Amino acid sequence: MTDAIASRLEDVRRRIQRVAEACGRRPSDIRLVAVSKTCPADSIRAAAAAGVTDIGENYIQEAREKYGALTDVPVKWHFIGHLQTNKAKYAVRMFDLIHTVDSIHLAAELDRCARRLDKVQAVLIQVNIAGEKTKSGIAPEEALALVREVASLESVRVQGLMTMPPYFNEPETVRPFFAALRRLRDEIRAEGPPNIGMEHLSMGMTGDFEAAIAEGATLVRIGTAIFGERL
């Protein structure tokens, strides 16, 4: 298992480097978040041994079990799934970056929980860039207003935007959605709301991360290409 994960990871890194250099970006500016949904703790340990520094989890309960088993593994934890408000207290305890804030209600609860821990919780605003009814996220035209509201909270800091575009078999078909998120990021940055950063664009997964990098992704969320097909 360890050798297979290390080999797949090296292939992903080569692909990231190749596309970054092709579009004039530094590969070091792109962080690989290894998505370990349904993978056992031992797989995360193997990935960390191969050089993974960032782990992404989709479900709070699953993450709690792995987090507790891997306290000795020096990785940063990212929450990338839909977060219910009543799970905010667990998320704040575990995660360095929460990618999926899409309401002031959730942000305010994260703020309350983070304040109790004397922590400033880093978050991304999730944008439903294609307006799909089956996906979470704030509408693009409402994103700036939400960023402004979240900026008023003392213990939450916005660091950028995240999206999950529609699925297409052809990665280039997804590229306009990534470009739209980048433009939205630039518009919000130009407005200059206080107490926020717009340094991150979390977009791109196993099937389309190269197109996402070409459009400015700084965080790519890759699972299958590293851990193999999920059971």
Image: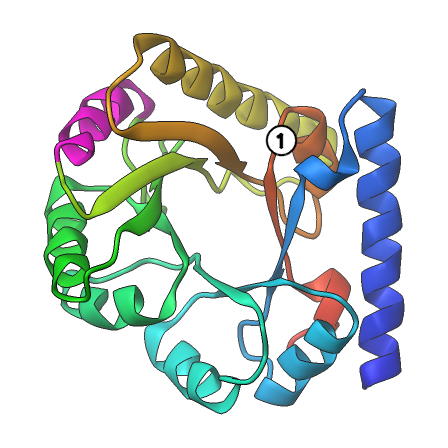
Quadrant for the N terminus in the image: bottom right
Is residue 94 placed above or below 213 in the rendered structure?
below
Residue 93 appears at what percent x and percent y?
Answer: 29, 71
Q: Nearer the viewer, residue 66 or 192?
A: 192
Q: Amino acid at mark 1?
A: Val
| Extent of the magenta region | 140-152
Residue placed furthest toward the front: 118
Q: Nearer the viewer, residue 142 or 54?
A: 54
Quadrant for the C terminus in the image: bottom right
Q: Please name the residue shown 43% across and 66% down the image.
A: 58
Q: Main secondary structure of the magenta part?
A: helix
Is residue 77 placed above or below 196 in the rendered structure?
below
Q: To which residue does mark 1 refer?
A: 174
Image quadrant of residue 38? bottom right
> Can residue 100 be seen in this snapshot?
yes
Residue 77 appears at what percent x and percent y?
Answer: 48, 65
Residue 100 appears at what percent x and percent y?
Answer: 35, 49
Q: Secondary structure at mark 1?
A: helix
The residue carrying pointer 1 sits among few (fewer than 14), some (14 to 19) or many (20 or more) residues within 10 Å by Cα, namely many
Q: Please name the residue shown 75% across and 37% down the image.
A: 210
Residue 105 appears at what percent x and percent y?
Answer: 10, 47
Is residue 1 placed above or below 204 in the rendered structure?
below
Q: Is residue 151 magenta?
A: yes
Q: Please name the residue shown 58% across and 86% down the image.
A: 41
